[in-house]
Image: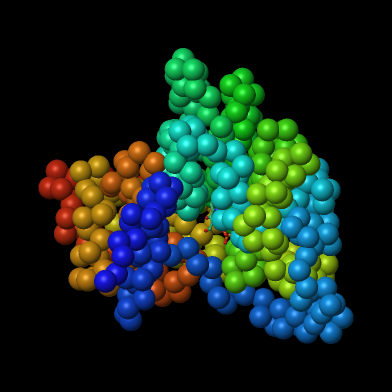
């Protein structure tokens, strides 16, 4: 007879929730579905030919190193390259400030492992990256949400929240920020919001965890500095990745922080996996040294800009009054708000079964379970033709369920938040 595994589970394992995104991806592998649900880059952007060449050269010239264990901190050459890469954004770092991770998702787990005890408080945006929430939840912490608007986290509400917590004698361990083209909303924080967040973090003596995988995917406008560059890592930890600029299959991410903080992260990572693969690190270092990353960025952003534009045009054309969406200046995602009485979770099954279209329900991104009328749409993976057709299907579904009061409003409302 099979034993009951539940009786063996740790409290942490019981508190883990399987990611809604992963569950959805299974559902949408069916043929004929147009999926806006994943967060996959477009495979047409993968540097296949360059990787072929670089991999051959790495195996010819450095196999004795590339196929060996490496140090936990990561390939020194790659860390050097990354320090140089981040300098273009005003981040002052040497290889001693950099730790290589298996994607930035591992960085989130390392941050949690090093800083969080059960019962600790952290601040997250409403909405925030689901994979971050999932990583932190495993450490049985309390996540306190602060709303966002079109300029980023609402720092007035952040100030209120921090004051309220201080009144209860509680100090959040960190503020989790995705300040550039946020997953899920596509919103970018203004420089003022970044400065004010740092000021508040200083006033209430908490840290900032800046998770920034989309920074390079900018279509227009000018880039505010990373939060890390504003305090040079004094109380900020920076996470980034090659997943959106080279390919996620390499699983190369990195963390930047003060040397003493990196030391703590290294100890935590040692117990997880000893080191990230030397092979993919050697390949990534070579890709950087040959400037391949830098040279390919304009092509990649052009692909995603065209897809974003296709989605914005389709939404404008198809969606009824009362539905609003964000206009991201970069990244891979766009955020849609239906009238507040509507529930995207209740509509999902019909979307998939009757309309062959999928999205991610918004509430999964809200630590407090709100946002039931919202959804996240990914525009990087589907083709422009699929975007057109998929939005048509989605709009048909929305129109079928639109509350009478809203469907009678004549005014068209699209906002740029
Ligand atoms: C905000 C954010 N952080 C981290 C990650 C994880 O990326 P990686 O592939 O580097 O693990 C993602 C992936 O989509 C993301 O959107």
Position of residue 383 relative to residue 108, above or below, is below
Q: Which quarter of the rendered image does ligand 1 occupy?
A: bottom right
User: Percent position (x, y) of residue 312?
Assistant: 42, 58
**Quick check: can you spot residue 181?**
yes
Of 196 and 392, which appears nearest the observer? 196
Q: Is residue 23 left or right of residue 257?
A: left
Q: Is residue 346 left or right of residue 330?
A: left
**Quick check: can you spot residue 295?**
no
User: Percent position (x, y) of residue 179?
Assistant: 57, 43
Residue furthest to the top: 167
- Quarter residue 19 falls in: bottom left
Position of residue 286 relative to residue 186, above or below, is below
- Quarter residue 417 falls in: top left
Quadrant including the N terminus? bottom left
Q: Is residue 15 left or right of residue 117?
A: left
Position of residue 283 relative to residue 243, above or below, is below
User: Percent position (x, y) of residue 154?
Assistant: 48, 31
User: Percent position (x, y) of residue 150?
Assistant: 47, 39
Of 178 and 217, which appears nearest the observer? 178
Point 41% across, 75% down: residue: 385
Residue furthest to the left: 404
Of 300 and 313, which appears nearest the observer? 300
């Amino acid at each position: 007879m099979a034993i009951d595994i539940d009786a063996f589970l740790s409290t942490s394992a019981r508190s883990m929730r399987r990611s809604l995104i992963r569950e959805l991806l299974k559902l949408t592998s069916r043929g004929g579905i147009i999926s806006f649900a994943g967060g996959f880059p477009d495979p047409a952007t993968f540097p296949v030919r360059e990787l072929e060449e670089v991999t051959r050269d790495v195996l010819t010239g450095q196999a004795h190193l590339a196929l060996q264990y490496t140090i936990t901190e990561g390939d020194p050459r790659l860390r050097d390259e990354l320090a140089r890469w981040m300098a273009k954004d005003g981040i002052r770092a040497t290889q001693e400030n950099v730790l290589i991770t298996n994607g930035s998702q591992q960085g989130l787990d390392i941050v949690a492992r090093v800083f969080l005890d059960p019962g600790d408080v952290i601040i997250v945006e409403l909405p925030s990256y689901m994979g971050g929430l999932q990583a932190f939840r495993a450490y049985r912490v309390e996540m306190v949400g602060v709303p966002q608007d079109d300029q980023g986290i609402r720092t007035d509400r952040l100030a209120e929240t921090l004051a309220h917590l201080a009144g209860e004698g509680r100090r959040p361990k960190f503020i989790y920020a995705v300040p550039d083209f946020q997953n899920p909303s596509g919103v970018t924080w203004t420089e003022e919001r970044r400065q004010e967040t740092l000021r508040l973090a200083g006033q209430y003596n908490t840290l900032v965890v800046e998770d920034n995988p989309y920074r390079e995917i900018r279509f227009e406008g000018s880039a505010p500095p990373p939060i890390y560059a504003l305090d040079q890592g004094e109380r900020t930890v920076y996470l980034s990745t090659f997943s959106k600029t080279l390919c996620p299959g390499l699983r190369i991410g990195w963390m930047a922080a003060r040397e003493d903080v990196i030391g703590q992260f290294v100890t935590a990572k040692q117990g997880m996996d000893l080191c990230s693969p030397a092979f993919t690190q050697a390949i990534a270092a070579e890709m950087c040294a040959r400037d391949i990353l830098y040279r390919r960025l304009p092509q990649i952003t052009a692909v995603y800009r065209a897809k974003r534009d296709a989605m914005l045009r389709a939404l404008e054309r198809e969606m009824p009054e009362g539905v609003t969406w964000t206009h991201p200046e970069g990244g891979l995602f766009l955020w849609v708000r239906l009238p507040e009485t509507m529930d995207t979770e209740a509509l999902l099954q019909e979307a998939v079964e009757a309309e062959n279209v999928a999205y991610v329900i918004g509430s999964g991104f809200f630590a407090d379970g709100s946002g039931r009328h919202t959804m996240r749409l990914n525009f990087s993976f589907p083709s422009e033709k699929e975007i057109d057709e998929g939005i048509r299907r989605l709009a048909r579904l929305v129109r079928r369920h639109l509350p009478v009061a809203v469907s009678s409003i004549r005014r068209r409302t699209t906002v740029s938040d």
